Amino acid sequence: MTPVILNAMPQPPSMRSRARRTLRRVAAYAVTAIVAAAVPLFGAVTPARATTDSGDPLAVSIDTLTPSTVPKKGVVTVTGEITNDDTSTWTGINVYAFIGDTPITTPAELSGAVVAAEEDPTAPLGDRITEPGDYVTIPRLAPGASASYTLHVPRKDLPVSAPGVYWFGVHALGDGPDGRDTSADGRARTLLPLVPTSKKTVPEEVALVVPLRAHVVHETDGRLADLNEWDRLLGPSGRLTSALALGSGSQPVTWLLDPAVIDALRQLAAGNPPTLPTSTAKPRPNAPIAVQANAWLTRFEQYVPDNELMSLPYGDLDVDGAAARAPALYATARERSTGALAAAHLDATPVDAPITGYASAGALKLDSATPTIVSDLAVGGAQSPVAKIGGQPLYVASSGASSGGPGPDDPHATVSMRQRLLAEAAVRLGSTKPLIVSLPASWSTSDPAAFLSGLNVPWLSLMTLDAATAGITPARLPADQLQYDATERKEELRKSAFRAAQRLIDAGQTLQDVIGSGDLSTSVLDDALTTISYESRGARTRPAVANRDAILAALDSVTIQAPRGVTMSSARGSFSATVVNGLPVPITVQVEGTTDPHANVTAPANVRVPANGRSTVLLTATTQTNGVHMVTLHLTDAAGNPISTSVKVPVRSAQVSKIIWVFIAVGGGLLFSAIGFRLTRRIRRERRAKA
């Protein structure tokens, strides 16, 4: 980093520099306008929030702000970084703090002020603090280079006294290729509340909802895919690590948990073993990611008692898509969520929480007993934290608090998010209505401790969602106040995704019936549900199809062999077939034979076959007519679902006609009669001779 020099004074302005900066801003706005016009052509982009480009040559960040509110006395300390985004070297860069002179006192004013600042990132928001010692100078900054800064601003130099929320930020002014002027060459801004307190001050209650969500994807053998992403999520600054740390403080939070994440971490902790019996992959318990997953789970179990746990449908199901295309899968995901939590010995309150903050009318009707967390924008800006639409309970979260700062620096940086949350709470102080803040699913903080410590102010009380909303009468909202437009519907998963998931579930159940032991069907169900999650929206691949094909391939390794033909000398006869098990586990199957109406084939009820083994089955055929009867043999599971290709066996019946048996009987009778007659005559002759 480049060192800083204190107390350098600004230099004279340059008209050429001002003109050049104006051209940059015009170009930036033109690019923004072109992109905005192109969005309807290429589809809406839905990041948490886009950063507005100011067109400034210097990029400024605010990395820390201490304290997080205007203090009664002492010093406000700001740190951050200046980066030269220009192609020329800048020198003598003075870094000043600034503060607004008009307090923002209502939620509407705050929303309007942030929108206006986003629309014009160069608009003046306050006066620079130029007292000696309150600013610093960076002597030189080459193209692409960065330098850190630290500002210490005494409370006496902050000319604000009225309660409210003030703009606060940093300006960088330097000497560039066209000289110097008084306009900022780089800027960052945030919000700084001033809230006098007394013994009578009733703190604003804030429910902080922290998501524990992730895109869970499985390989065809059931192992977790994309281990690099899990490594990032579980790393020191990873999103799951960050979310977990927010629940480790003395102030409670509400965790929004997808139980599939817990199951995935347990699988990683066990070495990521496969769940399909045909896989030869071996678990690796000592892998670094297994250690990370196990450590995360251990800390999670420690922190759960101090926080509230709310559970999503298993796999973070795309509830809106399911409501329109496969409502039965919602009940399946809910039931699986309950079972997974019970297996993990976790007690959670079921909720739905669309990842965009918008819920469809169909989704709200799926389960009237389960509340849904929505953005206030989804209900026409309703300010009540608890509402009902058609009997469906809603938690209404602040869209402003979750959107972060106004830019042009990162709106989702730790300071930006924290200060926006504080500002939203400050303008609601005394309203007796709690503030619900549902953090974006993709958000993480690089400094959870700083985020939490900045919220530890006497006029704000972090509470669980249930505690904050207890006793509040829900606002009754008309159905037409629910906002869910064509853009939201377009984002839903298509019917093909839900159909593929259901087919995967069915295939897994069939393989489970064949194997008998273990819990394969549940593992496959988990795989299927994670393929129809909110996080799967827009995915180019459909894992459910590949995973189902892998199961069908496993079932194809179980076959039946039979003789090329069978000849019977009577109406009833027996012949044998062989069941071949190509799986490395024992199986139990049934053999079924189908033929024409004049024949019938029966087999034993269940056939047990050892792993990678063979079993011989004795089948009985019965015919009613002479001739060749084509018998089709196939294997099924216990429910009668076919599990392999069939084999055809021609059975020839050579039984003799009934009339022939009559002739044989008559002939036999005559023969025995003649024999009897001759024996009688012989005996008589012998008696006469003796007489």
Image (cartoon, rainbow, N blue to C red):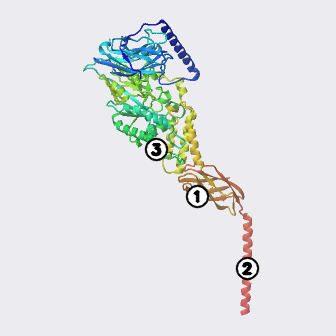
Tell me if label 2 and label 3 are in contact, CB under 8 Å. Answer: no
For mark 1, what is the residue? Answer: 615
Q: Secondary structure at mark 3?
A: loop
Structural crowding at the residue carrying mark 1, measured as other residues with C-alpha within 10 Å and reported as few (<14), some (14–19) or many (≥20) = some
Q: Is the N terminus in the top left, top right, bottom left or bottom right quadrant?
A: top left
Q: Amino acid at mark 3?
A: Gly
Task: Name the residue that disc number 3 marks.
Answer: 271
Taking 271 as reference, is 657 above or below it? below
Image location (x, y in percent) of residue 81: 41, 21
Q: Amino acid at mark 1?
A: Ser
Q: At label 2, which amino acid type do we have? A: Ile
Residue drawn at the location 47% of the way across and 24% of the way down: 48
Structural crowding at the residue carrying mark 3, measured as other residues with C-alpha within 10 Å and reported as few (<14), some (14–19) or many (≥20): many
Q: Nearer the viewer, residue 220 or 146?
A: 146
- Along the line of sight, which residue is nearer the eye, 68 or 95? 95
Q: Is residue 527 left or right of residue 659?
A: left
Residue at (53, 29) in percent of width and height: 492
Can you tell which of label 3 and label 1 is closer to the viewer?
A: 3
SS of the residue at dot 2? Answer: helix
Q: Residue at x 39, y 17 (%)?
A: 107
> Do labels 3 and 1 touch, CB within 8 Å?
no
Query: Residue beneath label 2, please?
Result: 675
